[in-house]
Amino acid sequence: MSRVKYYYDSDTLSYRKIKRKKGRKFGIFFLSLLGMIFSGFLLLLIYLNLPYIETPKEKVLKREMNNLQLQFELINKKMEQAEIVLGEIEDRDNNLYRIYFEANPIPIEQRKAGFGGINRYKDLEGFDNSKLIIATSKRLDILTKQIVVQSKSLDEIALLAEDKEKLLSSIPSIQPIRNEDISRVASGFGYRTDPFTKTRKKHWGMDFTAPRGTPVYASGDGKVIKADNTVSGYGKHIKIDHGYGYESLYAHLYKYNVRRGEKVKRGDLIGFVGSTGRSQAPHLHYEIFKDGSRINPINFYYGNLSPEEFAELLIQAQIENQSLD
């Protein structure tokens, strides 16, 4: 029930009842409604122009997003450094290691190839930082692939290096008699006068004059395939298979220090100088075979002679004289 209000009438000296007009009530209601609308509009303007107000949870999420973005930037910097280092390794691999071991360089297109076919990054699309995440993922995938390619290349190089090391140790590359034990180089490779028939004929090896019993050494790693006197003219002789198509022969021996089937290393004592078979005096007749053909042994003494000693040996070997066998 609404309160009844009165006012004091001084003319009649009495209280009179206040009567409200119907139009005034409507005016008050309209003004109140207008004030509310204006106040709401004003508050909306203030809200839109105020800085964004974040809830505590939103602040935590925003901080985490900023941290993730920073981590992605750091990852990209680390990948950039890794790409530089990997690029230097790839350059050495192509222009040094693979050339040295006679392997074809890996094309740059193969090393840096991307991934074709389906979209591998579809699940990463549609987010605020999708562009950064996808770019980083692609870069990481390509870098990973480059590392795999380089790793396989280094595995191949390791196998080639192991094989090359075996090859280098197998090639007959030292003089079979020590330089200080040699009296002289009696004959070299080529046409020489036969000591028995006195005719000019091809001499297929080198003759090293040395006293009977002088040690004879294996000129490379290999396996003894002969240690007998079954070949006419060679007398007691040893033949070593070095692999890779190389063989060496040591003839006119006094006695053996190895037997057939035995494996030897370069520098191992295998026998002693003698004059057995078709021989005129104690000496070692030494031959080298490559793929079944005799080749000049003069090119295989780089392992134990100085440049000066080799130059002197070369001069002696080129003299066309009489051989000893």
Image: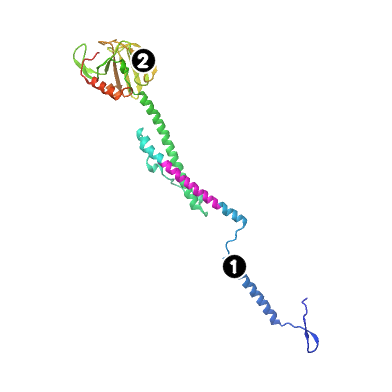
**Mark carried by residue 108:** none
Is 51 placed above or below 112 here?
below
Report the side of 15 relative to 83 (left or right): right
Residue at the spot x=61%, y=58% of the render?
55
Is 239 placed above or below 36 here?
above
Is 149 placed above or below 321 here?
below
| Residue beneath disc 1 | 46
- The reply to whether callout 2 and callout 1 are in contact (CB within 8 Å) is no
Relative depth, front residue between 22 and 82: 82
Picture coordinates of residue 95, whole percent (x, y): 36, 38
Relative depth, front residue between 180 and 17: 180
| Residue beneath disc 2 | 270
Residue at the spot x=50%, y=48% of the render?
74
Is 314 placed above or below 57 here?
above
Magenta stretch encompasses residue 185: no
Query: Which quadrant of the rendered structure holds the C terminus?
Result: top left
**Chain part drawn in magenta:** 65-87
